[in-house]
Image (tube, helix red, strand yellow):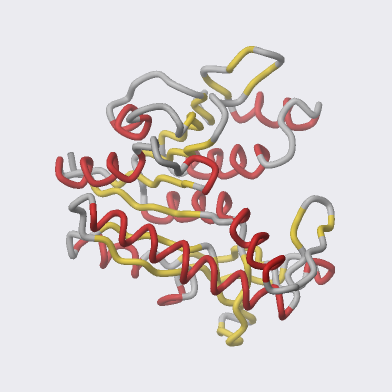
Amino acid sequence: MTDIIVAKIGGSTLGDHDTTLADVAELARRGARPVIVHGGGALISEWLERLGVPTKFEKGLRVTDAASLDVVVGVLCGLVNKRLVAELEGHGASAIGLSGADGGLLQASVRDPALGFVGEIRTVDPTPVLRIIEAGAVPVIAPVGIEYKDGRATGQLLNINADTAAGAIAAAVGASALAFLTDVPGVKSGERVLESLSAAEAHELTGTGVIEGGMIPKVEACLQAAAAGSRAVIVDGRQEHALIGVAEGAQAGTRVGQE
């Protein structure tokens, strides 16, 4: 295999019995080109509380003021990113950690002044990711970007939703697949897990509130990647070898954007 596979992982699916990082290493050994985009919201909340930095939410999104941004950057780009790199190396995979700020990977603008330093992606420059892949390593990407105005960087770091970052990166690198490894079996309608979800169906279910909360940015990211030609899937990352299953085309979870 030579295809690029983008996997978005979060703390909710990484545990003692999780096989995701072992799967990444195995795919790399098989000749695939995996890319990891990670979150870390729970650990950010833990460190904000530990450091006595107040946490405030607006419309379900974390307000990121200057003090919070320092913690977000430190936790995502430092603690979480380097732990993942170390664990991948422990599984025998060469891994290089970076953030969306490195090499201008994620170029963003302030999403809403009420949210503070929260970014909305405007442009993705895939060059840093592609260079790491060409060097035979696994890129491990933290969702922090740089603010750009009039095509130029302002020097301001911005906190970016990891799901959104994964979709934008998958589209930019021409990934054959985008896998969201979550702690649910897929997109559900009532008690039924939907095997596939077209763009029209996704918009309808979002409008009626069936798709809600944290599932919305995942579905939107899948639609973006699918529009660029990726096979986009939301699967239960707690299931053994879920990522290898996605790479092999197994039916699991919900495929989004399939017409």
Residue drawn at x 61%, y 86% as measured from the top left? 154
Give the percent coordinates (x, y) of residue 257: 53, 31
Nearer to us in this view, 125 or 155:
155
Q: To which quarter of the image does residue 149 belong? A: bottom right
Quarter of the rendering occupied by the N terminus: top left
Q: Where 63 falls versus 245 (above or below)?
A: below
Give 51 or 62, whichever is nearer the viewer: 51
| The quadrant where residue 156 appears | bottom right
Which residue appears at 31% of the width and 55% of the height? 87
Percent across and percent down for residue 26 are: 21, 41
- Asked if residue 105 lies left or right of residue 198, the reply is left
Q: Position of residue 21 (x, y in %)?
A: 33, 45
Q: Is residue 65 above or below residue 252?
A: below
Left or right, residue 186 beside residue 190: left
Residue at position x 49%, y 51% from top?
166
- The residue at 28%/39% (across/down) is 23
**Vertical side of 201 occupied by 146: above or below:** below
Position of residue 215 relative to residue 121, above or below, is: above
Q: Residue 56: x and y, percent? A: 82, 63
Count of numbered tags: 0
Q: In the image, 171: left or right of 113?
A: left
